[in-house]
Structures are given as C-alpha cells and as structure tokens.
Image: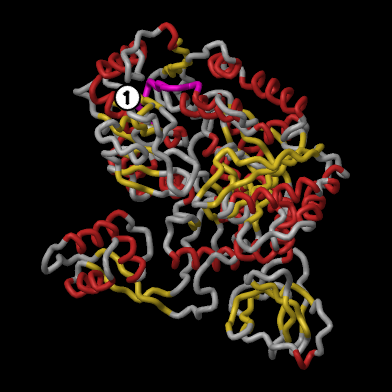
Amino acid sequence: MGRMAHYPAGAPVAVLTTQPLDRALDYRAPAGGVTEGDFVKVPLGPRTVLGVVWGPAEGDWPIEKLRPILTVLDVPPMRPEFRDFLERAGGYTLTPLVAMLRLALRAPGLGEPPGKRKVYALGTGEPDRRTEARDKVLDVLRDRPADVFGATELAEAAGVSAGVVKGLVASGAVLEQALARDADFPPLDPARPGKPLALDQADAAETLRAAIRAGGYGTTLLKGVTGSGKTEVYLEAVAECLARGRQALVLLPEIALTAEFLTRVEARFGARPAEWHSGVTQAERRRTWRKAAEGQARLVVGARSSLYLPFRDLGLIVVDEEHDTSYKQEDGVLYSARDMAVLRAACEGAQVVLASATPSLETWANAEQGKYARLDLTSRFGEARMPKLRAIDMRAEELPSGRWVSPTLQAAIEQRLIDGEQSLIFLNRRGYAPVTLCRACGQQVGCHQCDARMVEHRFQRRLMCHQCGETAPIPETCPSCGVEGKMAVAGPGVERMGEEVATLFPEARMAILSSDLFGSARALKARVEEIAAGGADIVVGTQLVAKGHNFPNLTLVGVIDADLGLQGSDLRAAERTFQLMRQVSGRAGRADKPGVALLQTYQPEHPVIRAILSGDEEGFWAEEAAQRRAAGVPPFGRMAGIVISDPDQRTAFALGEALARRAEVMEEVGAEVFGPAPAPIARIRGRHRVRLLVKAPRQSPIQAALARWVAQVEVPRSARLSIDIDPQSFL
C-alpha cells in the first residue's frame, strides 16, 4: 500500500474537484492539515463543491491569496492505488481526470454526519381504508423486503406522494424506524462449506485459491460450457479472498441476474453481500460506498460502475459472462468494464477471473498468448448433458405468409407439450414488429429525433425508438401521404411471435420475456422464478433469456432467425452470433433431461452456423483470430472511433473534414484515418452524427496521437466530439 503525504495547516495543496475544469485547483490546508487523498469540501466561486486532495499545489500563487479548504470529510482517504487507477483509466480512454473522479463519487450525502434517519418497513397493522396508492406502497415493501427506504424513496418506488406513506404509518400498516446511517453489513463466513464439486471443478477452484494465496496480480480465463458450475468455482476463489482478509468484487452484466446470484451467495456465505447497481436505493449506495472505503463491505456484487468504488484492500475481481456487450459503457465516459477490471487489478495487486462459456476473442487471444492463465470446465455439472444442436434449413420448409415457426420446430414443440416439458422460442428483436409502413406510399414510420425506424410495441400500444426512447401512438393514418387504413407491420418482434405461438398452441401456457415488458428488475425476477417452477409451457424471449437463467424443465430451444446477427459490416458480427447462439442453446437440458436446440437458418452452410452446430469452439476462435490478424483489427490491431454530433449537419461535417485534413499526426504513428462519413444512424435526438475511424498497429501510441490530433481543431460550442478507444459499436 502506497504512502500518503501529509500537509500541515496552511500548506498549499492541489484539490481535484468534480467540476468541469481542466486541472486541479490550489487551496490552503485547514487547521489540523490534510492527507493526500482526503475527501474535502472547498469553495468554488459562490458554491461549495466536493473534491479530493491530489498532491502539492501546482501553481505559484501567494499562500495568502489561496482560499482555505472548508471541511475534511469523515471518510477514509482515497488510496494511492485507486488514484493511480483513475489516472491510468483516464489516460487510456482519453477522459479528463475530473470526469473519472465523478465516476468515483457517485454516492449521495458523503459529507453528512452518521446520525440516524427514518426508514420504513412493512408493519403488522391493516390500513384504515384501502386505496390503489396505498396498495402500491405495500406491494413495494412486500416485493423488496431487504431494501432500506426513506419516505421519499418509498414514495418514488411506488409512484405515489410521500403523504400516502405517512398515512400508512398512522394505521400501523407501515412501520417507521430510526436506523443508524450506514450500518455495517452482516459478516460473511468463508469457512461455510460450498456445494460439492466435481473433479474438474475442484481442480479449477484450487488453482484459483492458490493464485490468491500467492498474492499479486494475475488474470485467469475460466472457460466452462453452459451449466458447468463456473459460479460455484469462482465463489471458492471469493471464499479464499475473504479468508485472507481482502475484499472481492463480482461484476454481473445485467441487473436482472443480481437477485438470483445474491441468493446463491447468501447460501454459500450465510449473509447477503453489498450491492451496487441502478436498482438499489440512494441510501444503500451511500452505505456501500462508505463501507467499501472502510473495508467493512467484504464482498460487493454490482454492475460495471462498481469498478469505481473506493475499496480499501481489493484482492479479487470476477467478471461473470465477460464477453457480454453490456460491459461496454457507451455514454459519457466510454470504457470496457472487462478491460478496466484488469487495469484495476493490476493497480491493486489483485487477481481477476474472467468467466464465460463463450469468451470474447480479446480474452481468448490473451490466454493463447500466455498473458492470461486459462482453466477449462468441459462438462455440465451432475447428470446434465450439453444439448444436441441441429439446423432447420428454411429453404426446404413450407411456411405460409406471415408465419415464422417452421413445421419442423412446431412438431418438436408439440412433442414437448405431450411430454410435459418446456420449450423456448428465441428471437432477438424486441417489440411487436421492427417496421411499420404504409401500403399506399411505401413510407416507413421513423423517429422524428433519429434516423431510425420506430418499433411497434403492441402490448403498450405505442411506437418506440430504440435509439433515443421517443414514443408515439400507433398511427391510423399514414404520417407521410395521409391515407387511412393502409398502415401495416413488417417482420416479427418478440410480441408478434407470441401471437403466433398462441395461435399454433392455443392450449399451452405462454410467457414472453423481454426487457420492455417489465417495469422493474424485481418484476422480471418474479416472472423468471415462476417459469423455472413450471409456470409456463412455452417461453418466447429475446437476448434476455440467454443470460444465466436456469429453467430445469426446459428441453427445447428454437431459434427463429439464426442468421440475424450475420448481416452488416460489424467486425464482431461472427463472434457475437456465435456467442449468442451457443449461450441461448445452453438454456436447454440443464437438469437430468436431455436437451435439443434447433436453429432456423437460410444459410446452413455459413461457417459460423457450421461452427455452432459442430461445437468446434477452438476451431472457430482460431479461424476468427486468423481473419482479424490478417485485417490488422482488434485484438491484433488498434481502433478508435470519433463521433461528431451537432444540430446542424454542415457544422458536424465541417469539423470532421477539418480533422481529416490534419491527419498527419496520426499517420506519423502508422495509423490510417477513414472518413468523415455519416454514421450508420446519422441522427439521434435531433443531432446529426458524423463518424471517423482510426486503425493502427497493435503497438502504436494511439492515445497520445489522438490527443494531439483533436487539439488541432476548435470544436464549436454546439458540437460534441467523443473518442471511443476500442469501439464495440459502429452505429
């Protein structure tokens, strides 16, 4: 652990604030002095803002002219290892340090004293009268018994006024309590026995435990087929980390997976860990932040932003489903949580476990080159066996117009219904239909704010733009030509697929799983648990169902359009299609009954489809790696995307052309610049988007060159310029 310098009272120090400035500001240390890394409140103009003591003063102002630090917060200082991580992450992603600091301070009320606060829980009384608003409050408390709510948070969660909560307190239906602010988390017991492990699981777990015992940095790819028990293996690594007195962080790609995972953690360690994601209350975020800094939160389970918590002694980071695209932050600070997890561990001297059945090509290549260790789990746990995969050649199927379930798939589902088993129909399109068009003029209904089609969501009776969230009523009259009664939908979404399933199998119980159809992650969790318990015969789902859910009675997976992801120019199209098909196929046969996955395809001879069916994963990765290496693209080359947006299209293009004319600085480091050109989605939220793409050799110092390049042009106040290192999306 690095040493932190102490500055006596009156000494000039640099304080980095979260305000949009280009540097730290100089202040005078208060009475008692300050330590490097202290969280402080300082005056900035007429305001008081939060900051961190970053080091000695950077300017040459006379001490008497420096304003004093007002308050030193009663929280542990930011450790040198964490500050080093923020600086290195900012340098890699070309993000200003103040923006990185904002990521590290996403907790409310850090400057408030401990004290007590009023919280609300379910009481034993009955309301003196029942209303819809009161029932909403009681439903929230029943559904979320582990959460800690203040009056305002409870009212917001229920969608009612705070007065409704107060009325329920008076009747005893809701209990008001005074709770110590930021109470400790219950202790976790790493000595509790875990589940019995198979031989290959036990060997992998011991290898991970040995790495943690040895100390220092290291990254391991834990590659196991779906259902092979990767979670139980890496929980043994968590147990070793906790036993050695260090902290652990487990990253999950989707908030919907959190509840099921927390239950498994509680069974393993005897208590629930700390949580950090958008679904927890503000009070819990503050509590987790402070307890992580104090070292009392021994295990945190969270989304990608939990990487920026101020852990006191972080010894292990697990990135579950490390291939998942949800780990890429596409707004604000652009970063890959998988890559930043490796960087954070290197700064902290911690171990990283990257767990996946279908790892990213970047991770696979790093393991092949010896940069990462690799552990393989090749069989499913217990009696479960991997499903058989077969293609349905849609060119040979007789399908009526407007139908998408082939006769072959229909027969397979009918047999499952007879056998009392569950089937899953997978289609990676949300909504009812991806296109709404006019049969009179041919015009497709698009978003007013974006160059994107509006997607019909029939259950919500709305059209929705999946780029900006804009919604509109489903039109009766064509917005373009004004003709009435000619609006029609084209192509299936998951809701339309549900209608077809209900028609084909009228006696079956059907469930649709799509993120658009659930108001909260807890509502989704409840539905998933109901399905797992046998509450549906046929599940129709989007990509959501491919992520970690376990349906023991599910023996058939039918993929409606296995070719969908193979279209377009995305360099990762083959990789993502392979991953998605293997993941969703892995939902079948996870218990003692054998499973089958049927892939409807018009291209059964396509190399990706053949690789999926054959199960030759190593062959697929080797071939994909060879193609990427020949093209000089990631992970064997460097790429950066520059997106310029402006309300005026000409302004955006002019800035892009100005950059292109000054590309010599990029050429000096061996980089090529492509563009400017309109982005594939050329307008979002009313802003026109122009894209440039940079491609460079693997060892090229691309960040420094990019910084010099964009510094040559003046960005108009109306324009925005963002740089995405290692872009995942090319839209």
Query: Residue at the location (69% across, 42% down)?
Result: 676
Residue 413, x across and y down, in percent:
31, 17
Looking at the image, is 615 positioned above or below residue 149?
above
- The picture quadrant where one finds residue 536 is top left
Q: Which residue is mark 1?
A: 422
Q: Residue furthest bottom?
A: 64
x and y percentages locating residue 518 in the rendered image: 34, 45
Please identify the quadrant where the N terminus is shown.
bottom right
Q: Quadrant of residue 378?
A: top right
Q: Looking at the image, how many numbered discs can be counted on the residues? A: 1
Q: Is residue 363 left or right of residue 46?
A: right
Q: Residue furthest left?
A: 129
Compare residues 643 and 57 and report the one nearer the observer. Answer: 643
Range covered by the magenta-colored residues: 550-563
Please state the horizontal and vertical placement of residue 534, each as a whole percent of the image: 28, 31
Give the image location of residue 114, x and y in percent. Answer: 49, 78
- Say whether residue 609 is left or right of residue 417: right
Q: Is residue 440 magenta?
A: no
Residue count near mark 1 (Cα–Cα under 10 Å), binned few <14, some 14–19, many ≥20: many
Residue 501 vs residue 665, the one in the foreground = 665
Q: How is the image coloured?
A: secondary structure
Q: Does residue 171 appear in the picture of this structure?
A: yes
Check disc 1 and report its element: helix, strand or loop: strand
Left or right placement of residue 290 versus residue 660 in this view: left
**Camera sees residue 534:** no
Q: Is residue 75 above or below residue 608?
A: below
Q: Give amino acid for label 1.
A: Gln
